[in-house]
Image (tube, helix red, strand yellow):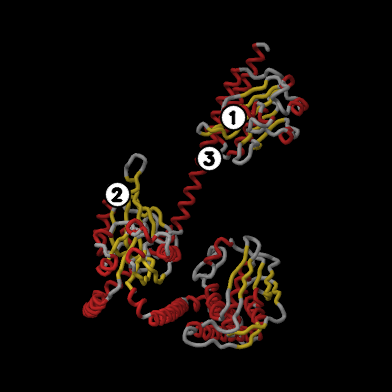
Amino acid sequence: MTAQEKAGRLSRLYAVASGINEAIVRIPEEGRLFEEACRIAVEKGGLMMAWVGLAHEGSDILSVAARWGKDDGYLDLAPVHASIDRPQGLGPGGLAFRSGRPAVCNDIASDLQYFASRKEALARGYRSCAAVPLTIQGKPIGIFVVYAAVPVYFDEQELALLSTLADNFSFATESRRNNRALRESESRLRAVIDNEPQCVATISTDGRLLAVNPAGLRTLQATTAEAVIGRPVDQFVHPDDLAGYREMLAGAAGGTGGSAQMRVVGAQGDVRWLDIHLVPLRSHDGSVGSVLSVSHDVTQERATLARLEQSGIEITQLAERLGTTLDSITDAIVTVDRDWTITFVNREAERVLQRPRAQLVGAAIGKEFPQGRGTAFETQYRAALAQRRTVEFEEFFEPLQAWLELRVYPSPQGGLTIYFRDVTERRRSRVEITELNARLEQRVRERTSQLEVANHELGAFSYSVAHDLRAPLAAIGGFSQALEHELAAGPGTSDRCRHYLDRMRAGLRQTHEMIDALLALAQLSQAELRWEEVDLAPMARTAFDNLGAQQPGSATLDVQPSLPARGDPRLLQLVLDNLVGNAWKFSGNRSDALISVGSEPGKDGETVFFVRDNGVGFDMEYAGKLFGAFQRMHSQAEFPGTGVGLANVWRIVTRHGGRVWACAAPGEGATFYFTLGEFPAP
């Protein structure tokens, strides 16, 4: 090779390096950068073909991320392996990847041992090949491979230039991946803050609001962030608490966090008590750049405390009665935290356990009482903690040679409160009384469970009214507006006016029926359901017709001719209204929306009713929260609603002695199943 040819070749390689370095600055996307580098190597460097291969976990093949030049299917026929155990891993590409150093084959035609794809390469005119590794923090992630049309193309000087180019390439790849990981981390953090139920905000050191999450907007009674961002935070602080807040904010801006309970005044005048925590946020140089504010609404707790303070006489009398009761309690009490460390022992527990509390408090329960490991004591304790439920049992405790009766309560902080008493003598002398007490305790637990269910249903009553009366009230409002426009057009009563009046009367009747049904639902724990023979098919058609008259849409209803069942017709109509309404709403974006209502045989001969749609569906990973009040599978912007309809369905079906569940997949629609018992639930 002449000096002039050598100079020309190096000049082209420098042009390649310059072009790729310019692309590194200009192109942010990794895939486009790889492709541009290959193009520059071919078009500016005079090479026949260039490609980038990347390694993937679980595969030995370096997959093609980008290519340019004369390929003619070569890379598909001759993949490069990272493993030395495969012939395709012995060439320059595999060697460069494993060694972390450039590798070259300057005469493909004479390389009979290592170049596994020699025949395919020669057929495409390749005569020499060079590969340089791409690394991140010293670990190979891929290779950059180029092919020339003449042998002995690559010498040490050119390989050094390619190595430098690969180092720049690797640095750019690492930077892009780090930036992508940082953006993903910031996105996850923003999602956490936006869904945090507490008020989270950042404040400048001079007291201006920089950012606030949705919970904070609700606390400040602001409809948008723009309405409050940039305003001084102390504008929302109650005048009586203003001095204290400014002092605490100044301390946080100076580097010392603080917390206090103070009042804030919302944009609409609502006064709320907040437990406010201010934390300084420091910049890279250690200075305080802003302040993080995390607040928890304690208005209810403060109101309760105020009522207690105003009822001093009643509290005193209650304290006297409570003191008398505690003095008469003979139960032993022990509390443990989430780490199984004993945190409290009362006097009776000292007597029963025959240990002083000074020895027990602060010790691990498993260390003090190793004989309990692997016994019913440990099993029941762990069940109460894991299932968040009260556990009651009796068991013989070997170290004391005594039978103990225990009641174990999980605490909100993750520990346990254990009540126990020595019942050895009682078991020995009064077996019959023990059995009677066990039956009585079972009845008490059943009644407690019934009361809890009743309280839950009554607590959700107001939400049910707001949700289920929306449709008829919307119909009344819409037709009344239409009637107003019709009357304004001219005197006289047209057929259309009469039609609007008829629809408004129908809406009023439906509202009246829903109110009666919801009032009956609130009284289910005390009154029997109106148990009748019903047909769910016309109920489904009624629900569908009402939706068609009140909401836009072009869904098709496919319902079995008859769906006989037994139950309260008003409440079962609400079940169909909610389920068909959901199917209408979540399939409304399809021109071929189809809602199917029918039944199929279930296990043990029961009839399983279903409402199926071909709408947006949902991820079954979140099905566990589907029937809870205010639980939503989609955002309010996508599909409006209050999120209590399915909670009503669950309550009604449960009172009918049945079950309700759903199956769905994103983009494939959803099916809601429910059963009805032969008799109402107790």
Q: For mark 3, does the 10 Å Cα neighbourhood hold few (<14), some (14 to 19), or many (20 or more) residues?
A: some
User: In the image, which is nearer the foreground, mark 2 or mark 3?
Assistant: 3
The quarter holding residue 610 reads: bottom right
Q: Mark 2 points at which residue?
A: 253
Residue at mark 1 to residue at mark 3: CA–CA distance:
22 Å
Q: Provide residue 50's location: percent of width, then percent of height.
A: 67, 30
The quarter holding residue 345 reads: bottom left
Identify the secondary structure beneath mark 2.
helix
Q: Sequence order check: which comes first, mark 2 or mark 1?
A: 1
Which is nearer the eye, 495 or 608?
A: 608
Q: Mark 3 points at which residue?
A: 177
Q: Which amino acid does label 3 sit on?
A: Arg
Identify the secondary structure beneath mark 3.
helix
Identify the secondary structure beneath mark 1.
helix
Q: Mark 1 points at which residue?
A: 98
Which is nearer the eye, 676 or 392?
A: 392
Q: Provide residue 409's location: percent of width, then percent of height.
A: 38, 68
